[in-house]
């Protein structure tokens, strides 16, 4: 077997880690390691990146085109898509069609999709799921800088003396960048870290100061900082005079918030903590403010971004080593989408909807039909589908039925839409279930192109394997539809390098001070050939005649991209979320991500080890709120909002503020019966960025009174049992179903649920306690085990799941199997370290045995020695000893 090493990039978050993959193409096998040479991660990977090789199986892939539930050939499917879109445009006009695309697409896919919709179909109706992730940063950048420019780079975090993390659980959502920050702080103990987040997250593990501010009060906090900067005499007068406009208005507006005590009261913070934060910021020249979804996903997200940028402009701390505001993107290629115009309100190559830019794009593409107006952004787009204004939609590499706010409305919209086309690499998602036409796209291990990470670094994603089944690259699928719609001349591509070269050429086209100067310029690659494209090394744009090797930082020269070349201070006022809590909906719902899952789990849930750390949709709630609403830890709660409802497992946590709950975004209708968080979320959007308010929905919570709780572990997937609460996830060598419901269940129900499995049964029951246990074995191997109880006190699934690895369960094991009690030392407990599958019980035992530091636990168990994301939890276990 031939082993080949291929350099590529991770499929998940905006850190954009480089990967070295050892590939055995003939065996469809690969292993991954962090690329030591890649400047984003220098060899590190988090648990998700480490598990990428476990997601490449073909079992769950969509491999053949389908129409109306039947397999078909590509020609038929592509003709149907082209015909459907052409007919809809002919009958109802171009704004009756739409594309909803994704930060998972490669830049080349994205470029072609945008070109087809805006340039040739003639509508602006292409928007991306990045709208949900960072469009407030885009809008804030444009207001302040004139362009959507991230000023700095990751290296700045290792040069800063103060790192402020706002609305970002960096430890879980951007783990490798967090590890870089942590290592920098460990080497330089004088470095301070301030975390600003309503929740006390794992990121607080390295915080010198945590400000658990009232949700939505960020503008007040940073307006207060702007005033404090002025009062401390820390305004950079030269920079402000020579390179900015409008500071007086910004400070006047900021002063409305009042003094520090007033700010602290508005933000529900301790005034001394606010004072300390302001003192640190004013006193520390080299500081960087990272912000993420906690800032962006808000109806005031753009104002929050500008409130932060204002403070950096006021101190002149921007674009210099170790200084600046820094927006972290969620997705691997959210940035690439911004470059090609994936948002409905931008054109390609950072060009805008104005006469000059439209003319540039029209002439470059030779596209007389270029749309002249922005299209509908995500929330408005699905509303237009619901009302019938949009009659044909093509969704690429994303799962809006789960991830969009008011997700039940999105589901209903697609159910009523005359033509729904979905391209995806996996076979089953909530959105694919509603598609009339399913198009099999290549997955991460087969794709070939480029992505851009949060620091503007373009990296190659390279194929590890040839295309599987009949799957095709997204750029090919889109180009084939374009050709069938009569646009063959504009879509002649045979290889992604040709698309990248065209994209690069457009970025440099008439891009100069006398015509139309833009920040995004990779014109050095305008004539790139395939060999050079294949060998392309990671590089930060711009890459042009002036910066042939790329540019780490913008704006140190004080030159921005506004007409005056000066940055703009934006006066911003505190605005609160539209929907407030009330007697009916008294709690604020916050949403976010967990450590080991990515978005709607369509790929990470394929890796069994990523399903072990947190295995169910849950709700974090403060202990006093739990008491008030009569919720027990580990029981199940009903959560309702005006828009929808869900069921989630209760976790009582003092890390939550009172009156606020947190639910992860990941669980879907494919993985749960009632775990779709998006159904709850209000569809309110920011007026500037159109980004939805995903972090603030008034909700009600109450106990779900189940008559029974249970679970099934089965070697084969099973039809879903009747149960109001149901979570279905994959374990190593088994499938797991967590269940709860009303009515009465007994042994006969367990037998019925396992009806499709064959084997010798063993069982135990105590009807008086409502306890039923049933297992099937075949030739000594465990086939399935199912258990029921009247309460949540059921045996640990971790140990029972490990029995599926055994070739035979002996008689002692069979007795233990039904008791659910592992023989001493065999139950490792809930997984804490996903990289090395180290469980909580193993760590507790190591602590009992004398380990008293994370280093000692790492040396004994390896836990925490790869990505390090579990270290905060190991510390908690150490602290609880
Ligand atoms: Fe992938 Fe993790 Fe790196 Fe993000 S931090 S790019 S998920 S390995």
Image (spheres, rainbow, N blue to C red):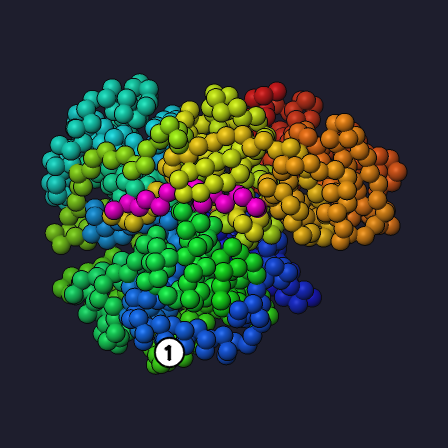
The residue at 29%/71% (across/down) is 93
Does residue 321 show up?
A: no
Q: Disc 1 marks which residue?
A: 485
Does residue 570 show up?
A: yes
Q: Position of residue 727 (x, y in %)?
A: 60, 44
The residue at 73%/31% (across/down) is 770
Q: Position of residue 419 (x, y in %)?
A: 43, 67
The residue lying toward the viewer, choosing from 626 and 448, is 626
* SS assignment at label 1: loop
Q: Position of residue 681 (x, y in %)?
A: 40, 42
The residue at 39%/40% (across/down) is 642
Check the image and report above or below for 423 versus 275: below
Check the image and report above or below for 87 versus 616: below
Which quadrant of the structure image shows residue 802? top right
**Quadrant holding the C terminus:** top right
Which quadrant of the structure image shows residue 523? bottom left
The residue lying toward the viewer, choosing from 592 and 154, is 592
**Highlighted magenta segment, given as a residue range:** 672-687
Which quadrant of the structure image shows residue 879? top right
The residue lying toward the viewer, choosing from 19 and 717, is 717
Q: Magenta stretch: residue 706 in it?
A: no
The residue lying toward the viewer, choosing from 415 and 292, is 415
Q: Tell whether circle 1 marks a residue whose Cβ is less than 8 angstroms from ligand 1.
A: no
Q: Is residue 830 left or right of residue 519?
A: right
The residue most toward the front is: 743
The residue at 59%/55% (across/down) is 55
Q: Position of residue 332 (x, y in %)?
A: 44, 53
């Amino acid at each position: 077997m031939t082993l080949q090493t291929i350099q590529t990039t991770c499929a998940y978050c905006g850190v954009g880690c480089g990967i070295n993959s050892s590939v055995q193409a003939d065996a469809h096998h690969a292993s991954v390691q962090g690329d030591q040479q890649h400047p984003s991660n220098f060899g590190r990977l988090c648990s998700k990146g480490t598990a990428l090789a476990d997601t490449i199986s073909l079992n769950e892939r969509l491999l053949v085109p389908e129409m109306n539930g039947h397999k078909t050939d590509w020609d038929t499917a592509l003709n149907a898509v082209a015909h459907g879109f052409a007919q809809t445009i002919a009958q109802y006009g171009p704004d009756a069609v739409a594309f909803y695309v994704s930060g998972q697409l490669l830049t080349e896919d994205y470029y072609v999709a945008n070109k087809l919709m805006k340039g040739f179909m003639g509508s602006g109706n292409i928007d991306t799921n990045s709208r949900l992730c960072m469009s407030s940063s885009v809008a804030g950048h444009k207001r302040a800088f004139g362009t959507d420019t991230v000023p700095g780079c990751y290296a700045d975090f290792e040069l800063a003396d103060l790192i402020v993390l706002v609305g970002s659980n960096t430890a879980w959502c951007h783990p490798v960048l967090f590890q870089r920050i942590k290592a920098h702080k460990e080497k330089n103990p004088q470095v301070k870290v301030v975390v600003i987040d309503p929740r006390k997250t794992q990121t607080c593990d390295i915080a010198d100061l945590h400000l658990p501010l009232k949700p939505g009060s960020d503008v007040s906090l940073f307006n207060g900082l702007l005033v404090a900067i002025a009062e401390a005499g820390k305004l950079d007068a030269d920079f402000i005079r020579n390179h900015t406009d409008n500071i007086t208005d910004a400070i006047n507006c900021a002063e409305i918030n009042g003094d520090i005590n007033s700010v602290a009261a508005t933000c529900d913070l301790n005034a001394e903590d606010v004072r300390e934060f302001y003192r640190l910021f004013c006193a520390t020249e080299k500081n960087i403010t990272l912000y993420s979804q906690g800032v962006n996903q808000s109806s005031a997200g753009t104002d929050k971004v500008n409130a932060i940028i204002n403070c950096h402009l006021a101190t002149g701390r921007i674009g210099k080593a170790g200084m600046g505001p820094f927006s972290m993107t969620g997705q691997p290629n959210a940035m690439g989408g911004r470059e090609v115009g994936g948002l409905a309100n931008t054109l390609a190559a950072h060009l805008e909807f104005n006469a000059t830019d439209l003319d540039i794009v029209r002439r470059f593409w030779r596209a007389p039909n270029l749309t002249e107006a922005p299209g509908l952004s995500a929330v408005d787009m699905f509303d237009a589908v619901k009302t019938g204004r949009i009659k044909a939609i093509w969704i690429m590499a994303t799962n809006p039925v789960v991830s969009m706010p008011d997700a039940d409305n999105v589901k209903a919209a697609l159910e009523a839409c005359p033509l729904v086309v979905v391209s995806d690499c996996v076979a089953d998602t909530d959105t694919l279930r509603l598609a009339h036409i399913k198009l099999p796209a290549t997955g991460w291990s087969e794709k070939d192109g480029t992505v851009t990470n949060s620091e503007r670094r373009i990296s190659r994603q390279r194929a590890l394997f040839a295309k599987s089944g009949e799957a095709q690259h997204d750029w090919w699928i889109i180009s084939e539809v374009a050709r069938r719609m009569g646009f063959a001349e504009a879509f002649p591509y045979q290889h992604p390098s040709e698309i990248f070269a065209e994209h690069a050429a457009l970025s440099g086209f008439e891009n100069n001070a006398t015509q139309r100067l833009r920040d995004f310029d990779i014109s050095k690659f305008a004539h790139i050939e395939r060999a050079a494209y294949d060998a392309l090394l990671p590089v930060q744009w711009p890459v042009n005649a002036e910066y042939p090797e790329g540019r780490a930082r913008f704006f140190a020269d004080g030159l921005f991209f506004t007409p005056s070349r000066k940055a703009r201070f934006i006066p911003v006022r505190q605005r609160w979320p539209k929907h407030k809590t009330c007697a009916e909906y008294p709690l604020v719902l916050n949403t976010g991500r967990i450590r080991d899952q990515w978005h709607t789990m369509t790929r990470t849930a394929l890796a069994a080890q990523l399903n072990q750390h947190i295995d169910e949709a849950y709700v974090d709630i403060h202990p006093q709120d739990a008491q008030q609403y009569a919720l027990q830890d580990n029981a199940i709660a009903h959560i309702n909002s005006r828009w929808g409802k869900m069921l989630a497992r209760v976790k009582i946590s003092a890390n939550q503020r009172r009156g606020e709950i947190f639910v992860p975004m990941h669980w879907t209708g494919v993985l749960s019966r009632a775990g779709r968080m998006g159904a709850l979320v209000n569809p309110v959007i920011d007026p500037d960025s159109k980004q939805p308010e995903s972090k603030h929905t008034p909700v009600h919570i109450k106990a779900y009174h189940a008559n029974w709780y249970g679970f099934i572990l089965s070697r084969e997937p099973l039809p879903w049992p009747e149960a109001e609460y149901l979570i279905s996830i994959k374990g190593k060598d088994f499938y797991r179903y967590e269940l709860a419901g009303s009515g009465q269940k007994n042994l006969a129900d367990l037998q019925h649920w396992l009806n499709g499995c064959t084997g010798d049964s063993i069982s135990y029951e105590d009807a008086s306690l409502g306890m039923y246990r049933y297992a099937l074995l075949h030739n000594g191997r465990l086939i399935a085990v199912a258990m029921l109880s009247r309460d949540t006190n059921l045996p640990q699934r971790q140990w029972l799941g490990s029995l599926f690895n055994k070739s035979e369960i002996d008689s002692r094991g069979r007795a233990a199997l039904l008791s659910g009690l592992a023989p001493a030392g065999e139950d490792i407990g809930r997984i804490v370290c996903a990289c090395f599958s180290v469980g909580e019980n193993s760590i507790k035992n190591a602590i009992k045995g004398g380990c008293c530091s994370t280093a000692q636990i790492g040396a004994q168990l390896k836990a925490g020695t790869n990505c390090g994301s579990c270290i905060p939890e190991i510390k908690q276990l150490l602290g609880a000893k």
